[in-house]
Image (cartoon, coloured by chain):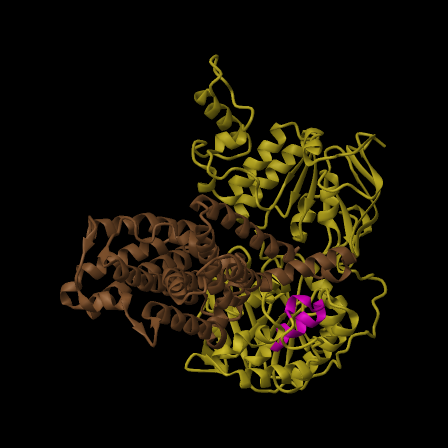
Chain colours: A brown, B yellow
């Protein structure tokens, strides 16, 4: 980094541009995409369209928040999609005790899986990608055992959760927004948040400074599991059915994409909460735009790939 | 004189900002065991990398048996018969001993498959020659470090190495394994194989080496037969001192005298042990006292500091702060008790590069600066501001990234981090290494000031002058054990060097 000062001007300019892109690229992209739609996409500005977009993106936002925390510690959590499925299975299993009990049970299950993964990482020393890959496979299996086939339900409370609106805003969106504020507070204002980024930035230094490194790691994965379970419950209530085979499939990839596109470096030491939310919105908006212009899903995937590479390139150039 | 097996003439090698090797010449004869010594940054590893083709020298020539050579690649050096055995043995830990030993040269049956029976028989035969009797089918990682090293050595020799370079080969070995290794080295020498032996253990050097080359700041400080060089002179050369004329008055910022309270020790380490790095090390620091830890690289100074700070798992020993035993192996417990370490390796163990100056300073004190888990920004700002001012930390703002600061200012940030925890005892591991002259003087003045305020300081420094002028008392370590303690008028550069050089009787 000291090289920055002595780098030739042309290089310095490019590095500065990349740094700026990593910092604000996601905001600019979302804004540009919105403007494009305002001009070229009919009916885009209608409230109904916006509602649909936001409701669809809410579970992605919620899981991405947890993923951002994990990535901030230089880790990764591949188990989030399977945890969503597990939460979906548990909520239906316990629905007989009433919706609140069922929801709490689902959240506990998600937190427990997260804490288990965290313990593997922090105490056993398993690499995060390996520990959570095992959970990705195993927990999906467990969810399928608990609820072997698609199961519909008619619990009014649970259905309301997914479909109700407060002051014109869907409850799902309000929950996602509230969790965003909560996680932002956690990162910016609490001891835990500061310790989290320090552990990601330099684990040896954190240990020598007396930080509870292992506890921080376990907590981070626990929160990721808990948030994935929230997303799972919300998705289930919108579906009005539990579908452990396909619910949350590939969600880990969407979440990682949102985090990376949002400017959080995979090397840890930094968490960008708002960037992550906008990263999720960017992908969602992109999909919606391409669909509205009658381009197939495969196009979205390819454009998504370009955006991911651009985000990682901007992050890389910054450190060079 | 016979032709040298390997000779370096006038080698220079620079990196941005440093001249790592400056006109270095070096000569290795057949059957010679040549000690290569020097402190950190002296240029040993650069020279080794030049000899083994990792780096190409900017100037100078390499001669192999009298013929000029250039190694474009480490493999070229290996093919020319130069083998390196690094500290971390470069073998495949999952494979069996036999496979590792004969990797790439496995005996084949007529069908082209590896003939296992013959492989194992051959491996057993080779290892017996090296005094190792173990099941050669066992995976390498299940064997002791000594055996692994021996396999690396046997492998190097079996691929026709004429020159073997060993970098700190005994640092992870038990005394018995060291004896075996030395037996093998004697055999190799008898076969005419030459060795370059890098180590800081004087006893070992005098036991097996014929000649010595001392590097200091990238230059050859001395070269010649080892048995003609008194130990004290070797130590003086390594530490950059001319034993004949040691300057009396120094240039450091230390005032020299502290009024150590006559009270009991602030921190007391009793019989710290961790094999093989520490053996029964005891140190005390009283309030207002600066205690120096002297010794060569690898003598156990950093390990002692880390052990006191709770950052090193121990086999035995206790640390007491104000008479109270501190829980072992927990840096957090040590910090709560008032002991804080500023580590030697700023980059790896000190700063958190992604965070700001402010967050770095507040890092260890966060629990004291928060209420029910929420950080009080006002309190953080106040403490950060006061330490930035007191330590004269030069940063654009407290929010500047710490990675953008100079080395000296980063060091001050780490000192501030320790002080912010309200530490009563500071363990400073090479606090002035690699920082500019101005910052160095400031840090030294600060150490004095803190001691005057009643803090206890344990000061590790390879700079003898700093140690003599800064410390009230110096505990000298050698090979992981206390070799002696000097206080008052005894604290002189000569006395420290003499203590380091004294024959270690605890060895063996």
Residue drawn 67% across the image and 53% down it: B200
Up the image or down, B428 lies above or below B380; here it is above
Residue A3 picture location, percent across and down: 73, 59
Up the image or down, A121 lies above or below A187; here it is above
Magenta stretch: dominant SS?
helix
Drawn side of residue A101 relative to residue B432, left or right: left
Which quarter shows the C terminus of chain A?
A: bottom right
Drawn side of residue A20 relative to residue B322, left or right: right
Residue A199 picture location, percent across and down: 50, 65
Up the image or down, B404 lies above or below A258; here it is below
Q: In the image, is residue B357 part of the stretch drawn in magenta?
A: no
Residue B96 in view here: yes
Residue B409 picture location, percent across and down: 70, 72
Residue drawn 61% across the image and 71% down it: B356
Which of the 4 quarters of the picture holds residue B209?
Answer: top right
As drawn, the residue found furthest toward the front would be A42
Q: How many marks can you see?
A: 0
Please report the bounds of the magenta region as a residue range.
B401-416
Is residue B414 or residue B282 the one in the foreground? Answer: B414
Drawn side of residue B6 relative to residue B261, left or right: right
As drawn, the residue found furthest toward the top would be B110
Is residue B25 or residue B266 the one in the foreground? Answer: B25
Which of the 4 quarters of the picture holds residue B373?
Answer: bottom left
Residue drawn 39% across the image and 71% down it: A179
Which quarter shows the N terminus of chain A?
A: bottom right
Residue B503 picture location, percent across and down: 66, 56
Residue B477 in view here: no
């Amino acid at each position: 980094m000291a090289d920055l000062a002595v780098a030739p001007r042309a290089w310095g300019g490019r590095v500065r541009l990349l740094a700026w892109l990593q910092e604000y690229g996601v905001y600019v992209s979302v804004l540009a995409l919105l403007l494009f739609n305002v001009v070229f996409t009919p009916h885009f500005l209608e409230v109904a369209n916006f509602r649909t977009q936001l409701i669809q993106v809410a579970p992605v936002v919620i899981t991405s928040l947890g993923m951002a925390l994990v990535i901030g510690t230089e880790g990764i959590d591949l188990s989030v999609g399977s945890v969503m499925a597990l939460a979906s299975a548990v909520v239906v299993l316990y629905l007989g005790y009433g919706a609140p009990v069922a929801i709490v049970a689902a959240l506990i299950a998600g937190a427990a899986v997260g804490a288990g993964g965290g313990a593997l990482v922090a105490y056993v020393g398993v690499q995060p990608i390996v520990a959570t890959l095992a959970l990705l496979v195993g927990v999906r299996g467990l969810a399928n055992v608990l609820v072997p086939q698609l199961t519909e339900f008619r619990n009014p409370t649970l259905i309301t959760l997914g479909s109700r609106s407060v002051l014109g805003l869907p409850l799902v969106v309000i929950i996602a927004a509230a969790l965003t504020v909560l996680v932002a507070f956690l990162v910016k204002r609490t001891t835990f948040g500061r310790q989290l980024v320090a552990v990601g930035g330099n684990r040896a230094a954190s240990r020598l400074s007396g930080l509870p490194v292992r506890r921080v790691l376990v907590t981070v994965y626990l929160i990721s599991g808990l948030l994935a379970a929230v997303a799972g419950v919300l998705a289930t209530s919108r579906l009005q059915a539990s579908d452990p085979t396909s619910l949350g499939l590939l969600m880990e990839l969407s979440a990682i994409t949102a985090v990376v596109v949002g400017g959080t470096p995979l090397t840890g030491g930094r968490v960008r909460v708002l960037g992550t939310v906008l990263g999720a919105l960017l992908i969602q908006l992109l999909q919606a735009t391409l669909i509205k212009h009658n381009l197939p899903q495969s196009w979205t995937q390819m454009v998504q790939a370009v955006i991911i590479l651009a985000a990682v390139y901007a992050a890389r150039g910054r450190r060079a | 004189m016979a032709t040298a097996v390997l000779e370096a003439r006038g080698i220079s090698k620079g990196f941005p900002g440093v001249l790592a090797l400056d006109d270095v010449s070096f000569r290795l004869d057949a059957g010679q065991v040549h000690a290569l010594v020097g402190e950190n940054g002296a240029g040993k590893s650069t020279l080794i990398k030049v000899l083994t083709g990792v780096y190409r020298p900017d100037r100078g020539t390499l001669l192999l048996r009298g013929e000029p050579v250039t190694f474009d690649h480490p493999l070229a050096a290996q093919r020319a018969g130069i083998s390196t055995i690094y500290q971390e043995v470069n073998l495949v830990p999952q494979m069996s001993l036999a496979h590792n030993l004969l990797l790439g040269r496995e005996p084949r049956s007529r069908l082209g498959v590896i003939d296992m029976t013959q492989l194992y028989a051959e491996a057993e035969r080779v290892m017996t020659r090296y005094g190792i009797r173990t099941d050669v089918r066992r995976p390498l990682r299940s064997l002791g470090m000594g055996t692994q090293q021996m396999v690396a050595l046997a492998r190097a020799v079996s691929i026709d190495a004429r020159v073997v370079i060993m970098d700190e080969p005994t640092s992870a070995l038990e005394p018995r394994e060291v004896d075996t290794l030395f037996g093998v080295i004697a055999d190799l020498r008898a076969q005419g194989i030459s060795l370059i032996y890098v180590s800081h253990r004087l006893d070992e050097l005098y036991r097996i080496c014929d000649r010595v080359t001392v590097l200091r700041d990238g230059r050859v400080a001395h070269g010649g037969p080892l048995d003609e060089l008194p130990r004290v002179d070797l130590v003086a050369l390594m530490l950059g001192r001319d034993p004949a004329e040691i300057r009396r008055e120094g240039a450091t910022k230390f005032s020299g005298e502290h009024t150590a309270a006559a009270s009991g020790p602030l921190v007391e380490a009793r019989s710290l042990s961790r094999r093989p790095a520490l053996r029964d090390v005891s140190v005390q620091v009283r309030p207002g006292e600066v205690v120096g830890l002297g010794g060569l690289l690898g003598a156990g100074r950093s390990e002692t500091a880390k052990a006191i700070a709770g950052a090193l798992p121990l086999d035995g020993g206790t640390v007491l702060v104000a008479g109270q035993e501190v829980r072992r192996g927990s840096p957090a417990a040590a910090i709560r008790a008032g002991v804080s370490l500023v580590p030697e390796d700023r980059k790896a163990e000190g700063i958190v590069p992604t965070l700001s100056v402010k967050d770095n300073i507040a890092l260890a004190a966060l629990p004291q600066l928060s209420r029910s888990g929420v950080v009080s920004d006002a309190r953080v700002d106040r403490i950060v501001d006061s330490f930035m001012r007191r330590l004269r930390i030069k940063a654009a703002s407290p929010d500047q990234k710490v990675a953008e600061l100079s080395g000296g200012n980063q060091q001050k940030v780490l000192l501030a981090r320790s002080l912010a925890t309200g530490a009563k005892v500071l363990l400073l591991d090479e606090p002035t290494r690699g920082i500019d002259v101005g910052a160095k003087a400031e840090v030294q003045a600060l150490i004095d000031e803190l001691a005057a305020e009643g803090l206890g300081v344990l000061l590790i420094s390879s700079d003898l002058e700093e140690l003599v002028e800064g410390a009230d008392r110096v505990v000298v370590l050698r090979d992981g054990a206390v070799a002696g303690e000097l206080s008052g008028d005894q604290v002189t550069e000569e006395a420290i060097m003499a203590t380091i050089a004294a024959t270690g009787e605890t060895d063996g």
